[in-house]
Image (spheres, rainbow, N blue to C red):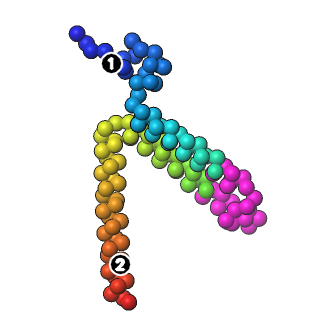
Amino acid sequence: MKRRDAYDQDTYSDDDLALARPLAQRAVDWGINGSILAIVILTALYALSPVDALPDVIPVAGQVDDLAAILAGGGSVTFLTVLRFLLRSRAGRIGCLAIIVLTSIGAVTVFWALSRLFDSLL
């Protein structure tokens, strides 16, 4: 006999499925959704604001500044969207953890090498 669990679409309603999702997954989804909303709002405010790092009265640089902000905001939203789907699987979570660990090791190694270099120069 087939075992029915909380994710069986034939037995449970959408409300039941939403309650059955782990609390951690709901927290990650809520946090990422809030981050995406904040990035979109802040990017729009920066692009529409007359006060920029480079004023819009400068012919090309002012528009390039706004375009760079929009591209950075879009890239951040894309990254967070991909991250949300990666974190839904065990392999994705393990992969993200491995990337964080390897990046941390690399950052510590580079910091150590630069500190040794500067110590030898001084």
Q: Which residue is mark 1?
A: 5
The spot of residue 62 in percent (x, y) is 70, 63
Q: Residues within 10 Å of mark 2 (few under 14, many from 20)?
A: few
Q: Is residue 65 above or below residue 112?
A: above
How many discs appear?
2
Q: Are marks 1 and 2 in contact (CB under 8 Å)?
A: no
Q: Amino acid at mark 1?
A: Asp
What SS does tag 1 mark?
loop
Q: Is residue 10 covered in magenta?
A: no
Residue at the location (41% across, 37% down)? 24
Name the residue nearer the viewer: 64 or 88: 88
In the image, the segment drawn in magenta is 43-68
The spot of residue 26 in percent (x, y) is 45, 34
Q: Is residue 62 visible?
A: no
Residue at the location (40% across, 24% down)? 20
Separation of marks 1 and 2 at Cα, in angstroms: 55 Å
Q: Is residue 61 covered in magenta?
A: yes
The spot of residue 100 in percent (x, y) is 35, 54
